[in-house]
Structure formats: C-alpha cells, structure tokens
Image (cartoon, rainbow, N blue to C red):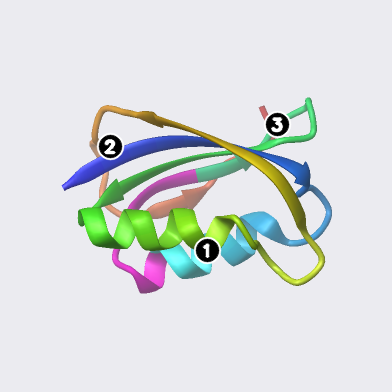
Amino acid sequence: MTAKRLRIAGRVIGVGFREWMAQRAEALGLSGWVRNCRDGTVEALLDGDTAAVEELVRACRRGPRAAEVTTIEEDLAEPVETPGFRRLPTA
C-alpha cells in the first residue's frame, strides 16, 4: 500500500482534470481526493495498492485530452482515513 500527494502543473484547470482523475482513481480502487488550487495547479492525494497508485501517476503525466501537463511533484503521504475517492472544492 502507498499514499502519495501530487501537485500537477500545466494547463490542468478548465479541462476536466478532476473528473478524469476521479474516474480513473475509482476504477483502480484508490482512495483519496483531487482539487483545483488557486495557483492554477491540481492537487491530489492517492492511497491504495502501490501498482494502482503508480499507474494513475503515469496516466496523470498525459492527463485528459485537453490538458497539457508540464510537471508533477510527488511526495509520500499519510494514508487517508476515509475510503473512497472525492472531488474537493478549490483550495
């Protein structure tokens, strides 16, 4: 099991990134959350099977069709306390 916090930069707001990521996280059985940030990045916490977390991180490097991801910062994180994957409001 792995938990990672991501900060995704580029053209990632206004392109459906949160919904795209949430659908993939749910399909992979991951817990956590995703939200837009006022600085124009997307932040996420992924928690679950290590292979599934890494698969979603790799997918985030491409993102949804209209996105242009330039960088992803990854940090290990504490596991989430609540199962399921949520879309949070902008922070």
Range covered by the magenta-colored residues: 26-33
Question: What separation in Å lies between label 3 and label 2 (alpha carbons)?
Answer: 20 Å
In the image, what residue type sits under mark 3?
Cys
Residue 35 appears at what percent x and percent y?
61, 41
Q: Earlier in the sequence, mark 3 or mark 2?
A: 3
Vertical placement of 30 versus 26: above or below? Answer: above
Q: Which of 53/87 is in front? A: 53
Q: Amino acid at mark 1?
A: Ala
Q: Are marks 2 and 1 in contact (CB under 8 Å)?
A: no
Which mark, by number, is residue 37?
A: 3
Name the secondary structure under disc 3.
Answer: loop
Residue shown at 20% from the left, 56% from the top: 49
Left or right of 47, for residue 16: right
On the image, numbered disc 2 is attached to which residue?
80
Residue 30: tell me if it is visible.
Answer: no
Residue linked to disc 1: 59
On the image, the x and y values in percent for residue 64 come to 69, 67
Q: Can the viewer see residue 50?
A: yes
As drawn, the label of residue 22 is: none
Q: CA distance from mark 2 to mark 1?
A: 21 Å
Q: Is residue 53 above or below residue 65?
A: above
